[in-house]
Structure formats: structure tokens, C-alpha cells
Image: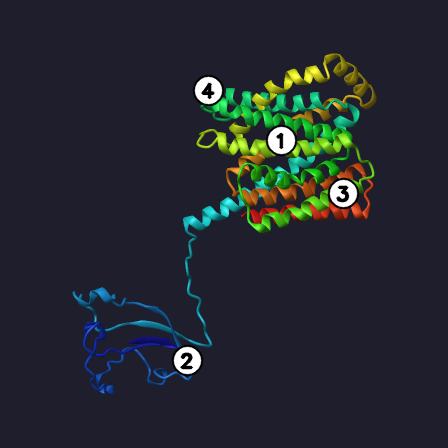
Amino acid sequence: MAFSAGKSYAFSTNFDPLQQNLWGSKPPISSLSIKDIDFKQCDKHNILSKKPLYISAVLSGFGHADESKEFKSRDPLVQCNAYEASQPQSIPIDIEFGQEAQAAATQKLKIGLYFATWWALNVVFNIYNKKVLNAFPFPWLTSTLSLAAGSLMMLVSWATKIAETPKTDFDFWKALFPVAVAHTIGHVAATVSMSKVAVSFTHIIKSGEPAFSVLVSRLLGETFPLPVYLSLLPIIGGCGLAAITELNFNLIGFMGAMISNLAFVFRNIFSKKGMKGKSVGGMNYYACLSMMSLLILIPFAIAVEGPQVWALGWQNAVSQIGPNFIWWVVAQSVFYHLYNQVSYMSLNEISPLTFSIGNTMKRISVIVSSIIIFQIPIQPINALGAAIAILGTFLYSQAKQ
């Protein structure tokens, strides 16, 4: 063997353990005398070191176990480099992350960006939507403009090849129709609610959607484990406590949020059953949903409110707010489509549990931001009810899995 400790030194023997049967008999034991050692280029006082020696590199490799059948000719001299403990030498190690680790890290970053974008867009939409409804209290037209903006954006994206045009057929649109009906009702009901009550109150009531989901699913024959039913208690209790302690309670606003919950539950059920196996998903799926909902909503919006009422309300809003009102309308319409589009895109990338948790956190961000921006007076007991309801929603998402 050869060591480097201060000066290089080496010795060789006539015994090669690699030439022995690694799996069978034991190697023969022979005496080894100092005469059998051939020292090369080393001083006597350097052979023995008072400090421990550590091997840093082996210059000739050792054989593998499967080489016991066919032995290659080896140099009887096996050379090693070593260093003293007081003079450590770093050994470069090249570690490369596997493709799976890199893909997992990229996926986590992608999901994080989806969530951050989703929450930010939702907060901006709710702020501008409430500003528009305060100056222009016509929720049916406001809802129509939101769907129209999204539909126009996607048509332009398809025409300019920014987004791939979905391949649809009659069966797809037929299956999408009940989903669009439920989506339209839920969208309009939520907008009516926010036109009557504070944004925070609407979202507190909408956090009770899991209770409606379990109720409807149970009526359709689906059963749930006991923890799911228990998680509904804080949801119902928290929503009830927030409702009875709301300073600016309005029955129409409360019922609008409740109807929105029920409609979105049916939307999810219809989507899960009717759209199973369909190739359109994510961004394009929501685009098609918006277009069909727009066609459904337009005649009802005209019948309920009408162009004459809209014209008078628009003139009044512009005279009071100024040109900024037009920007508010455009912003709330565009951001409504964008936040929903991102949520549908993220749903394709994550599990339902992760999406449910993200949706809960989204409501918290909307409630807190709306209270701060609109300076909504809130009582401690009301805040407690909201916290209990949101906690129940989180527990439900955990128990549902």
C-alpha cells in the first residue's frame, strides 16, 4: 500500500486478497515479515505517523463481487493517498438532483404561484365589485358584464392562438348546460348578496357551503363518516352567530349568499357527473362555462332590470364618481374572469383537499382585506362567529378526505 503523510511512501506485498474466492473458502493465512515489504521513496521516520491517517483516494479500483468468476490481471501494488488528521483535505462530491426532485420542486412553485395569484385576483375583484355595486346597484347587469368580459377575452385568445381552441361537440354542450344553469344562479345570487350587505358578511355566509354540500349529497344517497358531520357543527354555529350579530343585516343579502351556496353545490355535482371523461378542462372549460352562462343570463337580466333602468343608473354613477367608475366596471369584470380562470387551472394541478384548503384561505384574505379597505365596523362576537365558521370549513376539508 502507499500513504502520503508528510512525504509519499508506498509498500507492496505479494499477497492479493482480490485473487481469493470472495464467496467460498477463506484466504490462506501467511506470515508477513518486514522483508516482504518493498518500500519506495520513503523515509524511515515517515513510515509511522503519530497522527491518524485517513484515506483520501484509491488509485487502483477494487473488484466487484461478480468478478469472482473471471479475474482480471491486477497490479500487485495497490496505491492509496492519505492525509494526516491535522491537515484535512476536502473531497469534491458532485451531487445532481434527479429529475423527480426537480419536477417536484417545480410543481410546488407552480402551485404556490397559482394560489398567490388566485387570492390576489379574488381580493381585487371583490373590492372593485363592491365599489361598482355601491354606485350602481344593479347586480343583474353587473353579473352579465363579468361573464361577457371573460367570454370576449377567451374568444380573442382563441382567435389569436394565444390559447388552444377546445374541441367540443354537441354532447359536451349538452352536458355543460345544467352546470351553466347552476353557475349562473350562484353567480347572480352572490352578486345580489354583495349589493345588499358587506363583502365580509357575504363571504362568511358562503363559508357554509360544505353544509349544503353534505345535505344535498346525503339526499342523493351518499354517506359520510362521523367526523364530516361533526365538522358541520362549527360551520353552522359560526355562520349563525355571525348573522345574528351583523350590524347591517339584510335578509335579501343573507338569502342571496345562501342561494349561492346551494347553486354552487349543484354546479359541482353536475360537473362531476356530467363532465366526467370530457377532454375539455381547466381554462377552456371555464371559458365555455362562462359563454353558456352568459347566453342564459342575458334574457333574465333584461327582464328583471332592463336597459332603461341601466341607462339612468349609469348616468347617475358617472356623475357622482366620474370617469373612474368606468375603470371600476372594467376591473371588476376582468378580474372576475381571471380569478375564476386561475382557480380552474389550479384545480387541474392539485388535489381536491389542497384546493379546498386554498379556498378557505382565500375567504380569509377577502374578509380581512374588505374589512380594512371599506372600514367595516365589526363586533368581537361577530368576528368570533366568522372565525368559528372558517375553522369548521377547514375541519370539514380534512374530515372529507
Q: Which residue is mark 2?
A: 52
Which is nearer the N-term, disc 4 or disc 2?
2
| Mark 3 → mark 2, Cα distance in angstroms | 73 Å
The residue that appears at 53% across and 39% down in the rendered structure is 221
Q: What element does badge 2 sit on? A: loop
| Mark 3 → mark 4, Cα distance in angstroms | 45 Å
State whether residue 102 appears in this view.
Answer: yes
- Label 4 with label 2: CB-CB less than 8 Å: no
Label placed on residue 242:
3
Out of 135 and 30, give the one closest to the viewer.
135
Which is nearer the N-term, disc 3 or disc 2?
2
Q: Nearer the viewer, mark 1 or mark 4?
A: 1
Q: Quadrant of residue 321?
A: top right
| Mark 3 → mark 1, Cα distance in angstroms | 22 Å
Label placed on residue 263:
1
- Label 1 with label 4: CB-CB less than 8 Å: no
Residue 263 image point, x, y percent: 62, 31
| Mark 4 → mark 2, Cα distance in angstroms | 81 Å
Q: Which residue is mark 4?
A: 170
For the residue carrying disc 2, how many other residues have a C-alpha within 10 Å: few (<14), some (14-19), or many (20+)? few
The residue that appears at 71% across and 30% down in the rendered structure is 256
Can you say whether 273 is above or below 109 in the image? above
The residue that appears at 22% across and 64% down in the rendered structure is 66
* Amino acid type assigned to the residue bearing label 4 in the image: Phe
Out of 85 and 395, give the one closest to the viewer.
395
Residue 354 image point, x, y percent: 56, 45
| Mark 1 → mark 2, Cα distance in angstroms | 77 Å
- Label 1 with label 2: CB-CB less than 8 Å: no
For the residue carrying disc 4, how many other residues have a C-alpha within 10 Å: few (<14), some (14-19), or many (20+)? few
Which is nearer the N-term, disc 1 or disc 2?
2
